[in-house]
Image: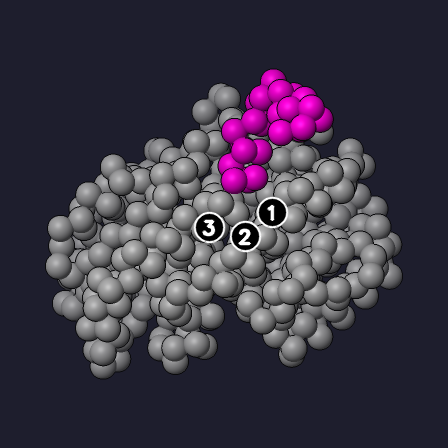
Amino acid sequence: MTETQRAQSERAIAAGSGTTIHEIRQQPEVWRRAADVVQARRADLDSFLAAVRSKEGLRIIATGAGTSAFIGGVIAPVIAKETGQRVESIATTDLVSNPLQYLAEAVPTLVVSFARSGNSPESVAAVELADSILDDVHHLVITCNADGHLARKYADESRARVLLMPPESNDVGFAMTSSFTSMLLSALLVFLGDAPELVRSLAASGQSIVEGEWDTLADRADPSVGRVVFLGSGPLASLARESSLKMLELTAGRVASFHDSSLGFRHGPKALLDDGTLVVVYVSTDPHAREYDLDIVAELREAIGPDRVLVVAADAADDSGSVSVLDLQSAGDGFLSAVFVMVAQILAVSFAISLGGTPDNPFPDGSVNRVVRGVTIHELSIN
């Protein structure tokens, strides 16, 4: 660590942001370790999934609450495209409130649960509802907490597997950073196969953002910016949703953040643009979707100025106002999401610090909690 980095670290700790910054910075190494975990479990996971995926009419549901739910939104279309299987993303918050609608089909079902703690009321209730409503249900729990309810509940079940992430992925800070990206990457590797070269490239790209882009991104935390919009297509639309949540969480709502798809933004939400808006556009590697992403980039630059539009792409999609993650054009939007989201994480913590916030604990009054509290799970009546 250089003297400059040491001084920055000391200031971050004093500002109540040291833990969050550390957990953002550590992600490339956590990805390597998560990939090792998946590889070590490969034979068992493949055997389990082969039996489940052979079932006729199988439905795979990726679920979680909040940030964990958005993992499903990223990976579901990717896995569906690559495997030809039916994969859906349904938040636990929806499964719990409307179980008879979302679990209405009497088909073999694999519930893939993502959970940092494994203790959120909805995460626990969702799997219990699936067990009570469905006749043929299996579970894959991907979690960062070996002591969480979900990990303990399914640890010894033959119809389930629990995949524990490296311990350091269990974020201590308020917001999910390492936990989000490690679970996302691991899920893709579980279903699509080990990819050691790709993981090394992703980690190298993540490290390049930490070392080469952090200060530039932090400079965008301008006091004149009061709104930040995140846009993307396909899997990256769900990443935009996660990015928007990071900004809201870490700034305690002092920066209003929004999300949409690159095409959807014109249908009303574009009305929120003003001189104090920063727009981040995630550019897809899919040639067709990419055209729509670049169209909205050009339109936004005309509307609010090039300095207010930040392009995040896997190549030199743009020669100004961009973060380019080079040499990963073939990785696909799902895997790239782990790297792209680091841009949003850095922006969010930088805005929080610039506003005098404490991103390690943005809500010291306890009005919003790291693990959700105050949820009453109501008994389901089936007539």
- Whole-angstrom CA distance, mark 2 to mark 1, is 6 Å
To which residue does mark 1 refer? 207
Name the element at disc 2: helix
User: Of helix, strand and loop, which mostly describes the magenta segment?
Assistant: helix
Rendered residue at 80%/60% (across/down): 300
Give the residues in magenta: 1-26
Measuring from the top left, give residue 304's x and y in whole percent: 84, 54
Measuring from the top left, give residue 28's x and y in whole percent: 52, 47
For the residue carrying disc 2, how many other residues have a C-alpha within 10 Å: few (<14), some (14-19), or many (20+)?
A: many
To which residue does mark 2 refer? 203
Left or right of 161, for residue 197: right
Q: Amino acid at mark 3?
A: Trp
Left or right of 21, for residue 222: right
For the residue carrying disc 3, how many other residues have a C-alpha within 10 Å: few (<14), some (14-19), or many (20+)?
A: many
Name the element at disc 3: helix
To which residue does mark 3 refer? 31
Q: How is the image coloured?
A: one colour
Image position of 234 with respect to 93: above or below:
below
Rendered residue at 43%/76% (across/down): 82
Left or right of 352, for residue 80: left
User: In this orientation, which residue lies closer to the viewer: 272 or 228?
Assistant: 228
Image position of 177 with respect to 56: above or below:
above
User: In this orientation, which residue lies closer to the viewer: 226 or 192?
Assistant: 192
User: In this orientation, which residue lies closer to the viewer: 118 or 103?
Assistant: 118
Mark 2 and mark 1 in contact? Answer it, CB < 8 Å. yes
Mark 3 and mark 2 in contact? Answer it, CB < 8 Å. yes
